[in-house]
Structures are given as structure tokens and as C-alpha cells.
Amino acid sequence: MKNFGFIIFFSIVLVLYALINYYIIRRGLSVIPQGSSLKMWLIFGVSFMAVAFIAGRFLERVSVNWFTATLIWVGSFWLGIMVYLLLQLVLIDLVRLLNMIFGFLPVLSDPEKIRKIIGITVISITGFIVLAGHINTWLPVVRNIELEVDKGGGKMKELHIVAFSDVHLGTTIEKRHLSIIVNKVNALKPDVILIPGDIIDEDITPVINNNVGDILTQLKAKYGVFAVTGNHEYIGGVMASKKYLAEHGVELLNDTAQLINNSFYVVGREDLTIKQFTNGKRKELSEIMMGLDHSKPVILMDHQPFKLEVAEQNGVDLQLSGHTHHGQLWPFNFITNLVYELSWGYKKKGNTHFYVSSGIGGWGPPIRTVNRPEIVSIKLKFTK
């Protein structure tokens, strides 16, 4: 039944994806003069780019090589291009529809010329947005936050946490990209590094083949590097991801709590998708935290920021999450704002601090137009 539901969902997504690309082709053909060979090139080009991402992802599971990598890169960029072409074309058609009803636009003496100008404008705007969004993915920013916890930290009066989420290591985010992240993180000289999920993208094979783990081992923190699983670790095969991360200096907390320096706890929850992909079940937070010394600060990592009140009810002092990407591409941030109580940034509920990161990498398009990729530097002060 669960697989049947997934097949139905995937089929709906594919049909919708095909209709969007068909709409883009039809609207593009209306701009090209009759008899022009550009019509065939448009049909072939859009069809190829539309299929490239899906084909690349499937072929990647058989063999990782330059051809599959090319398909994924082309298809990934097309996903972003498609979004901004679609938005503009829908807006144009909406204006045309309103003009048919209300007739507020002047009669055009050369409609074919105007169509060409509109077509060039749409392509130019899309190209600029995609290029700027791609450059943005290579320029992570450090968010500095200072928080207080009304507990004693043993020997420590302050803890410097550096966190980043949603790296999505794979074909489009590889060694060079990760090196930038690691160098920025290490420059902050953290006490502890926390990674709340989605370190690996769907398929771990490109990560292994390109030896990306060598860069992960360069992360340095006084008390270590801790992480939890995200949904993408489960999509790509969670056991292989867990093994690889453990072998490269990342300690995964799988529904477990770790007391560090006899001063504070780091608690990690399995991702919600454990049930969907393995038929397993993650522990209740109350079960994980049973027996902890609640006079000590408790920091929780939970990839998907659902049901924030659970952390508050269980006496968590700080929860770190990711997953949302805050939409990654405008205007999807409006959707994530509706879905999640906190789509991005800081919030406090009762005595519990929450921070949901927009992520350092990204899924699909190597493009980010809502915000900068981020590393979160938290100075956590223990006031008791």
C-alpha cells in the first residue's frame, strides 16, 4: 500500500512536470516565425533538458561517469530555468487574458516584433536570475547568534557551536564546494560542529568515487563533529551513508544522547522518513532523554522542524533543524512558510530556543534565489 501511494505521487509529479514543459514549448513556438528550423531545435532542446535530470539520476545508480554527471548538471540547471520561464509565461498569459476581457492595452502595429522582444526579455531575465542564483550558492554567509540558557554548563560558561545543514553531497556539490564550507567552518574555531541532516544527496556513489570524504575529515572542533540523518540519507540508502560518514569523522547520533565534557548533552533523532524507507520507527524524544541530567544544557538535532512543541515539552534548550531550504527558489519560500511553523531562522517557545537553517547546499538546481547559503555560529552562554 505504501509503495502504491508512492507510485501514485510520483506519477502525478511526472505528469505535472511533463505538462509544464509542454506549456513552455508551446509558448516558445508561438514566438518563432513559421517555417524556421528553430522550432525543431526548441522542441528537441527543451525535451532533452526536461528528461536529462530524471535520466541522469536513474543511470547514476547503474554507473557514475562523465555522461551521467553531464545529464544531471544539465537537468539540474533546467529545473531552475523551468521555474522562472514558467512564472514569466504565466504572468504574460494572465495579462493577455485580462486584456481580452478589459482591453486596456493599445492595439499593436507589429505584433510579431513585440512577441520577439517579449521572448528575448523573458530569456534574458531567466538567464540573469539563474546565473546570479548559481553564483550565490558558492558564497556562504556566517550567521552569528548569541543565546542564553538558564543552566550550568559544568566547567564551561559558554559553548561555541558551529552548525550547517543540507549539504547534499553528490554530483553537483562535490570536493571544491565542500572545501569552501570546511575552510569557513574551521576558521570559526568551534567547540563542537553539528550537522542536522542531509549531508549526502540521493546516491552516495559519486561521493565515494570522488573521495569527497577526505574533505569531511578536515573538519576540526574541540569536542568533535556530530550529525543526524536527513530524509536524503534514507532516499539514497541509509546504511551506506551512515557507514561512510562514520568512516570520515562524523559521529551520527541515531536516536541517542551524548554527554560531552561532562557539561552538556547533544541529542540526535533519526529522520521522520525512517518509517517510509525502512519500516523502522524512531524513538520518542521522551524515551531518548530518559535518565539525562536535566540540570545540564540539552541541544537537540532533528532534521525536519515539525512539532516544535515536543522539544519544548521535553526540556530541550536548543533545537537545530534544516530540511526546508526556506524554499531555495523564490517563490517557494511562501509555501515552506505555510507548511512549517518555522521555515527559517530563530524562534523561542517557552524556554526552548529553535534555529532552522536554510542550508549550505541545495537539492536539484544548483541555484539559490531566496537567501544566501549559511553557516550558523552560535555562542551559547550558560547563565546559572
Image (cartoon, helix red, strand yellow):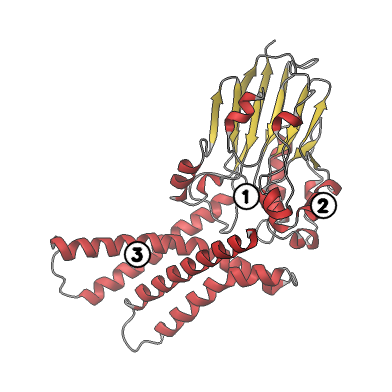
Which is nearer the eye, 166 or 237?
A: 237
Residue placed under numbered mark 1 in the picture: 361
Q: Is residue 96 left or right of residue 87?
A: left
Residue type for callout 3: Leu
Local crowd size for mark 1, using a 10 Å CA cut-off: few (<14), some (14–19), many (≥20): many
Q: CA distance from mark 3 to mark 2?
A: 44 Å
Which residue lies most toward the right here?
247
Q: CA distance from mark 3 to mark 1?
A: 28 Å
x then y, percent, for residue 218: 80, 44
Secondary element under disc 1, as helix, strand or loop, is loop
Residue type for callout 2: Tyr
Precedes in sequence: disc 2 or disc 1: 2
Q: Is residue 265 left or right of residue 48?
A: right
Marking on residue 89: 3
Residue placed under numbered mark 2 in the picture: 244
Residue type for callout 1: Gly
Precedes in sequence: disc 3 or disc 1: 3
